[in-house]
C-alpha cells in the first residue's frame, strides 16, 4: 500500500491557509494537509503530544512553515525540528511575508530547505504554492526509511 503523502501546514492566517489549501487541492498535491495555527500546536502534532497524542503515526512529507506565529514562533519551530536527530530530515519550507534579510539568513543557518516569500498577487500566490507542493510532495525523493518512529515517541505511546 502506498503511503499517504501528508503535508503539515503551520499558518496562523486563516486567509493564507485557505489559499494554500485551495492551491494544493486544486493540483492534487497531497492526500492530506494538516493545518495547525501556531508553533506550539505544530510541535505537539509532530511529537504526538497533547491533542495529537493519538494521531496516526508517521511524519509529513514536508512542513510548510510561517515565521510569524503565536505562542512559539516559526524560527523556534525550525530550530527544534532541525536539531532533532530524527526530524531534521523532514523538509521544511518557510512560507512567509518577511523579506527581511536577518530572517532569511537565520532560517538557512538553522537548516531550512527553502524560503519562499508569499506573493501579494493571488495568481502568483497560487502558482508559488503549486510549485512548492509539486516539488516537495511529488518530485522530491526522500531517503527510504529516513523517518522511523522516534525512540522517544515509542516510549511515550507504550
Image (spheres, rainbow, N blue to C red):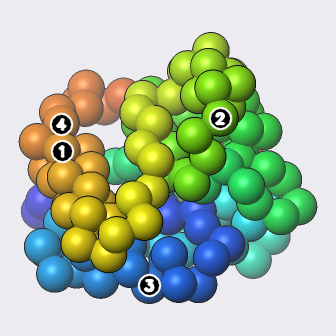
The secondary structure type at the circle numbered 1 is: helix
Query: x, y (%) of residue 27?
Result: 12, 73
Q: Which badge, 3 or 1, is on the more N-terminal residue?
A: 3
Query: x, y (%) of residue 132?
Result: 27, 50
Q: Which residue is mark 4?
A: 140
Q: How far apart are the alpha carbons under marks 2 and 4?
A: 27 Å
Mark 1 neighbour density, 10 Å: few (under 14) some (14–19) many (20 or more): few
Mark 3 neighbour density, 10 Å: few (under 14) some (14–19) many (20 or more): few
The single residue placed furthest to the top in the displayed view is 109
Q: Which mark is residue 18?
A: 3
Q: Which residue is mark 2?
A: 100
Q: Which badge, 2 or 4, is on the more N-terminal residue?
A: 2
Q: How far apart are the alpha carbons under marks 3 and 4?
A: 24 Å
Q: Which badge, 2 or 1, is on the more N-terminal residue?
A: 2
> Can residue 105 be seen in this snapshot?
yes
For image coordinates 75% across by 77% down, the residue present is 51
> Which dot, 2 or 3, sits closer to the camera?
2
Q: How far apart are the alpha carbons under marks 3 and 1?
A: 20 Å
Q: Which of 10 and 108 lies nearest the eye of the viewer?
A: 108
Mark 4 neighbour density, 10 Å: few (under 14) some (14–19) many (20 or more): few
Amino acid at each position: 500500500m502506498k503511503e499517504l503523502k501528508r503535508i503539515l501546514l503551520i499558518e496562523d492566517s486563516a486567509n493564507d491557509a485557505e489559499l494554500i489549501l485551495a492551491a494544493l487541492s486544486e493540483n492534487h498535491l497531497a492526500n492530506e494537509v494538516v493545518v495547525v495555527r501556531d508553533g506550539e500546536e505544530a510541535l505537539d502534532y509532530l511529537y504526538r503530544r497533547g491533542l495529537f497524542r493519538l494521531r496516526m503515526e508517521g511524519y509529513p512529507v514536508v512542513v510548510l512553515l510561517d515565521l510569524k506565529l503565536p505562542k512559539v514562533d516559526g524560527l523556534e519551530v525550525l530550530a527544534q525540528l532541525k536539531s532533532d536527530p530524527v526530524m531534521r530530515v523532514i523538509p521544511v519550507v518557510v512560507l512567509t511575508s518577511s523579506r527581511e534579510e536577518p530572517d532569511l539568513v537565520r532560517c538557512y543557518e538553522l537548516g531550512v530547505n527553502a524560503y519562499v516569500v508569499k506573493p501579494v498577487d493571488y495568481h502568483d500566490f497560487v502558482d508559488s504554492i503549486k510549485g512548492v507542493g509539486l516539488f516537495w510532495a511529488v518530485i522530491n525523493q526522500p531517503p527510504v526509511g529516513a523517518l522511523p518512529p522516534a525512540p522517544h515517541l515509542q516510549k511515550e505511546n507504550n
